[in-house]
Amino acid sequence: MNLPNYLTFARIFIVPLLVVVLLTTVTERWLGISSYALAIGIFLVASFTDILDGHLARKRNQVSTLGKFLDPIADKLLVSAALIVLVEKHLAPSWAVVIILGREFIITGLRAVAATEGIVIQAQSIGKIKMWAQCVAIVALLVAAATGTPPVSNFGLEYPSFRFWEVAEVRTAFSHLSSLDLTTNDWKVFGYLVGRGALWVAVILSVWSMYDYFKYFFSENKKRKVAQPSTDAVHSGLPEI
């Protein structure tokens, strides 16, 4: 155990706290503040520990096997819990969250299969961008809810969930933006637009990165199978063909 691992454990323990704050009225009753505002603070602190633990581990030469195991688990728990609560609060479409979380299960299984074949699948840059898109989506949608009544199901309008930019309040918000006279509802609208847009980016990158992971796995597996006969010939004493 070291400081980076303690920070990772702290991020894991923050997850149930975030869920309680968002799904109950404890903060309003005890602290007199919006549960969404407190949840934004908790999520940002947890996200900061994700950056800090990796930085400290490299700087202090404390990169450990336990840290490599716990860090992605902590990230997935934090993001998964937040996204599921957003669905519960009607702030995010369930289909998008299913795609994002389904991708995580599939890639975890693929890594396990790859490990049995002796193939190590490293995290790719596109996966990190996806992670940041998810964080932006979560914070922006919580901002949309914190600044007023949560925009349930596209502000109550009968629009398909993928046409989130066509909600009625968007034109009003942009007209106020041009005159620099933004209202609380305008901030809610912009938070909603940014959040739903970032969620779309996360969905697209989830599918894209999953394809890249499978492509890498099959490519490496094919290379190993091509090289295997030569290795077997050497061990058996037969001339290499």
Image: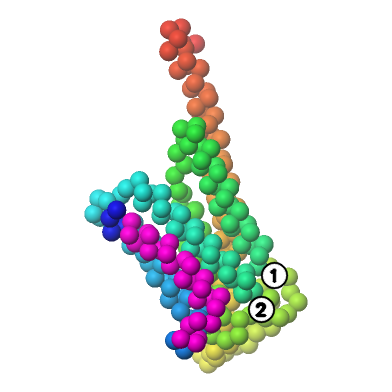
Q: Nearer the viewer, residue 210 or 24?
A: 24
Say if residue 142 shows up in the picture. no
Q: Secondary structure at mark 2?
A: loop
Q: Give the colouring mode of the picture.
A: rainbow
Identity of the residue drawn at 61% across and 75% down: 89
- Location of residue 189 in the rendering, given as x and y in whole percent from the top left corner: 59, 81
Q: Answer with mark 2 or mark 1, whichever residue precedes in sequence.
A: 2
Three-letter residue code for mark 1:
Ser
Q: Nearer the viewer, residue 20 or 167?
A: 20
Identity of the residue drawn at 49% across and 58% down: 76
Main SS, magenta residues:
helix
Identity of the residue drawn at 47% across and 42% down: 121
- Between disc 2 and disc 1, the foreground one is 2
The residue where tag 2 is placed is 152
Residue lying farthest right?
A: 158
Q: Secondary structure at mark 1?
A: loop
Crowdedness of circle 1 by 10 Å Cα count: few (<14), some, many (20+)? some
Left or right of 229, for residue 68 = left
- Location of residue 97 in the rendering, given as x and y in whole percent from the top left corner: 61, 62
- Location of residue 208 in the rendering, given as x and y in whole percent from the top left corner: 58, 51
Identity of the residue drawn at 46% across and 7% down: 238
Vertical relation: 53 (above or below) 159: above
Residue lying farthest left?
A: 60
Three-letter residue code for mark 2:
Val
Say if residue 148 shows up in the picture. yes
Residue lying farthest top?
A: 238
Vertical relation: 219 (above or below) 95: above
Q: Nearer the viewer, residue 115 or 189?
A: 115
Q: Which mark is residue 161?
A: 1
| Image: magenta residue range | 5-30
Vertical relation: 3 (above or below) 228: below
Report the Cα–Cα distance between label 2 and label 1.
Answer: 11 Å
